[in-house]
Image (tube, coloured by chain):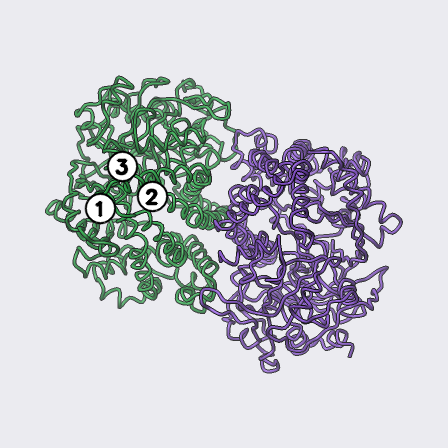
Chain colours: A green, B purple
Amino acid sequence: MRKSLLAGLFLCISATAFADEGMWTFDNFPAPVVQQKYGVAVDQKWLDHVRASAVRLAGGCSASVVSPDGLVLTNHHCVSGCVQALSTPQNDYIKAGFSAARRGDEKQCPGTQAEILETIGDVTGTINEATAARAGQDFTRARDAAIANLEKQSCSGKERTHRCQIVTLYDGGQYKLHTYRRYADVRLVFAPEFAAAFFGGDPDNFNFPRYDLDFSFLRLYDNGTVVKTPEHLTWNAAAPKDGEPVFVAGNPGGTDRQMIADELVTLRDVVNPLSLVLNSELRGRITRYAQEGTEQARIGNSALFGLENGLKSLRGQQDALLQPSLIETKRKADAELKAKVAADANLRTTIGDPWADIAKAQIERVAMYKPYYFIEARDGYGSRLYGYAKTLVRAAEERGMPNGERLREYGDARLPLVQRQLLDRQPVYPDLEQLRLEFWLTKLREELTADAPETALVLGKDSPETLARALIQSKLADPDLRRRLWDGGMQAIAASDDPMIRFVRKFDAAGRALRKTYEERVSGPSAAAYERIAKARFAAYGTSVYPDATFSLRLTYGKITGWNYRGRAVPSFTNFAGLYERATGQFPYALDQRWIDGKGKLDLATVYNMSSDNDIIGGNSGSPLINAKGDMIGAVFDGNIHSLGGDFFFDAVLNRTVSVSTAAMTEALIKIYGRNDLVAELTGR
Amino acid sequence: MRKSLLAGLFLCISATAFADEGMWTFDNFPAPVVQQKYGVAVDQKWLDHVRASAVRLAGGCSASVVSPDGLVLTNHHCVSGCVQALSTPQNDYIKAGFSAARRGDEKQCPGTQAEILETIGDVTGTINEATAARAGQDFTRARDAAIANLEKQSCSGKERTHRCQIVTLYDGGQYKLHTYRRYADVRLVFAPEFAAAFFGGDPDNFNFPRYDLDFSFLRLYDNGTVVKTPEHLTWNAAAPKDGEPVFVAGNPGGTDRQMIADELVTLRDVVNPLSLVLNSELRGRITRYAQEGTEQARIGNSALFGLENGLKSLRGQQDALLQPSLIETKRKADAELKAKVAADANLRTTIGDPWADIAKAQIERVAMYKPYYFIEARDGYGSRLYGYAKTLVRAAEERGMPNGERLREYGDARLPLVQRQLLDRQPVYPDLEQLRLEFWLTKLREELTADAPETALVLGKDSPETLARALIQSKLADPDLRRRLWDGGMQAIAASDDPMIRFVRKFDAAGRALRKTYEERVSGPSAAAYERIAKARFAAYGTSVYPDATFSLRLTYGKITGWNYRGRAVPSFTNFAGLYERATGQFPYALDQRWIDGKGKLDLATVYNMSSDNDIIGGNSGSPLINAKGDMIGAVFDGNIHSLGGDFFFDAVLNRTVSVSTAAMTEALIKIYGRNDLVAELTGR
């Protein structure tokens, strides 16, 4: 792995010809490279068509429009929160699957928002003007105010239908204004049963060969009617070919490929170790909870799903960081760039020593990491009631302030999504709330010690168990109450005797103070320093590089291919026959009865899942896998185990994208689920 | 911390005058240093008296004889397994405490063995002769055979009352024959309730100020009568003084202060991260289980106690390893010694390059680590039924072989303890068995992947849940059945249809093969290499150094003192008044009613817990804290948080030992527990 790692790192800063690396923006796609390597002409029409069909789901996934009637394809795991929210103890759609036979049966997904990118504009100059000659907290504040105001102005008058967002690229080297058509009414059309969508479960997650039907359909609505979408990808159910060029259009969530060695060391030695032990313990608690009964299983397994996925991904990241070659190579790259700056009188003046600033920020970060983590960054540990209360308390205060002075997430341009996620009706499970709050409070006390002032402030003389029990008496599960508190503003919040509201108010000032210090000493100086490093990098290596991922629309190219590892060849494809061979009848390798009954009807040679060497990362889930013609041939749902280091470097030899084929989805829709009507809509026949 | 770390490291290999570092053997105690520094004359009589009063508990703790009638003082946490084993749902002695009013009520602790060191002899020559000119697996085998035979011969004819053990010191630089008087009938006399013994629970563990009554009494019996012990420590309940010199005589379990940097890196990057995530998740599962009901709490909390203690200790170790200064300093020390070897023609020939051998062994270790961990080293993950079955299956096979050729733990000299721990009646909790087995099997599949041959071998087509359910149908909880299988040997094992016996037999050959490979490629070459490094160290630095801890009797010196950390002074003592201030009424800060009622009777100024700078580590729990006169003034029960790096280096500035004072034990025995009779026995009045 060492060799390929080195290759990957240098490619990411200096060239693009040797590997299919890069999460490219649509306004800077290296079409000539693709033309030369794959003979595929990616012209502006191709790009515009794909961009207009690509969908972002605000919760953190990708998707695409696949019919003229607003039908959207994404992963099952991207809608599982919605499927869970729509389920009840009597109707468990996670377990049974969901299939709306008529449009009237399609059900709105709470809190879900779909976004299609319409325009990209460059606003780097405006932001740079606002931040000129500022540093630290001053820099952060000026930048955030400029962003909030630009976002607000740009969507002025079309807030209902549009979202304007400033996307930071190249660590602040560029600021782009993305204007999205937004759809707040997104309805669930079809989701297979969990046993098919996530066959092999956590043991097979991030592994290959793989046999998952990880897809689902949503539909866009506006004003209560179906949205017409003349721009959509063509559904192509032909068998994919080994080696054929493929593209992925989606929203990779975040990468840290430009991160300097000193910060990687903080991740490796401080940030990740804490998250790993805490989330492992939480996983243990929820696993046991899910064994306590049928309803506990329904609730617990849903919570475990995301937790386990995140943990496995973090383990992979950490394994990458623990390879000594990674940090060493980064140190060399840092030193090389630093030397280039030192050798140029002009750069020396404008760039200075941002590496030293980041190193200093690391010391501050480590010193305050645990209080910041428990009181501000991960407070509540996923309790929904706590999250509602914190949003209500903070929003009430922030909304009383001018747009440019607010905490970034409460800017006017962002409030509609905040409000939607707060006010939509979502199930609140008291047992799980109790479990999460107890866990958070116990760990807070354990990690900060019982003698810490933060522990006294949050816990007082209570035990985590009794305090959690008091807090879940909160009535915030009621969306009407949340609406009243939202509308009532500060006055309503101050008058509320809801125990969770009172609890959050007790230490919200402490949380804000920690955040302020963190921004002053850590994130502010770091952001300013990375911006200078980005400028140095532009100066040293030119502009033919791709920016780190930021959950904004990107296009990657590559080919269908397996890989070789430790002398073993992993083929590109699996098929339905392999699924039946792997099924043991025991969870998570148990098939639903309809698959057992349907075996004879299926073409068992149908390509099921496939591997390609596109450069993706979390957030790309649900992205369309597109062939040279621009047709959809699959839905990306995973990476292989080696892809988990992709946060820090792209390993062209081992890093692979995993998709479920359009062919398999078609075959299953017809033969297993009897949804010929959906196939007809997809194919226009 | 960097400065003190450097100090500690160099001291441990070059000098002893600057800090109270060192776990000294009784035959090499630096009495002149102590005389000079503290003005205390530690003469042979003093040493013999303390040695003859010091007790080792075979389960992994220390203790001491404190009355002429075989009364033994140790920690509560050293007997909590016994207290739990004697408890039932109706009589929970963990919760209520145990107090035998008359000798006839004292209850035998299952599996417990107490050992008092009688003689120390040097057998280095004999072992060296047997291993001369051998390497790798050959070396290991010859050494183990020589050890097994020496241990057997030395105790020949007195096996019932004695145990002979070869202790490896200085990584094989010395082999010492320790002859112990062993007592297999050890009875519980007194243990306070858990709420007093472990007040502050896991949050306060390894922290200070501390308020724990972590002590208990056992009594030695032989042939059904009390053992007379004219040699015993004098109970001194006077108030201890800040700065007074103190000694700890006990059995530190193991340190790795001579470990080279390459192996520390394996611990830091491979071994510890896996253990941390796995044990954290298991902790989560058992925590939730313990919340499911009263009986589940009784069973689960007892299991959690050891698990959480181990986890916190491992976190501390890992935090030490993550300090870049530690590995860097070790690398420098390695390089220094290597240079000394290279500079000496004679050493070059006899020592060679053991550092390279260890580095090579690390590569092998990392490659096979997970299979070895799941199939052989941590198989069963603490399931008692699994442990019984593995011992029975292995012992049957091993006992059929000549003593010198067996796996080390089945040598004739070791069988009496194996047999006692196997055959004593111990409670088996089916729920906990299911939980542990399920956990082990789930993690085995997850970490090795479903496609690994080891997963197929152990799990077949079963799920972890169903297989665990089948396995806990085992009847091995019955000690009579275990006795029959033990006595019946291979034939009985082969004929057994017990599901756990069958299960273990299914892959025992695979486990043995992994162990053989591990010994051939990792532990064998490493042991031989460390022995050569030890010889190089002797040649380079002389012999005035102490050996790494090996759970054999050691003596450390120091003084009662607090410490300073980040500008905060931590005082040496706590008192009963502080206990009442800290009590919130909520677990784990809740006092039993007898303490609430007894507050008025207590002298609240009594020193409760105290800090001293002795060099100790896990295994020292229960050690007597001894003053200059050789009197007992406390029972060691913990180290502070900084002491957790003590595995790798002693930090004289921050590393502290925590004890409960004899004064506090006396006060509590009289005023809270009404055990004036015990105090009379202790004081001879």
Chain hosting mark 1: A
Q: Nearer the viewer, mark 3 or mark 1?
A: 1
Q: Amino acid at mark 1?
A: Thr
Quarter location, residue B577: bottom right
Residue where numbered disc 3 is placed: A547
Alpha carbon separation for disc pair 3 and 1: 21 Å
The location of residue B480, given as percent across then percent down, is: 78, 47
Q: Amino acid at mark 2?
A: Leu
Count of marks, rendered view: 3
The location of residue B79, given as percent across then percent down, is: 68, 60
Q: Earlier in the sequence, mark 3 or mark 2?
A: 2
Quarter location, residue B304: bottom right
Q: Amino acid at mark 3?
A: Pro
A253, A354: nearer the viewer: A354
Q: Earlier in the sequence, mark 2 or mark 1?
A: 2
Chain hosting mark 3: A
SS category of the residue bearing label 1 = helix
The location of residue B143, given as percent across then percent down, is: 75, 39
Residue where numbered disc 1 is placed: A350
SS category of the residue bearing label 3 = loop
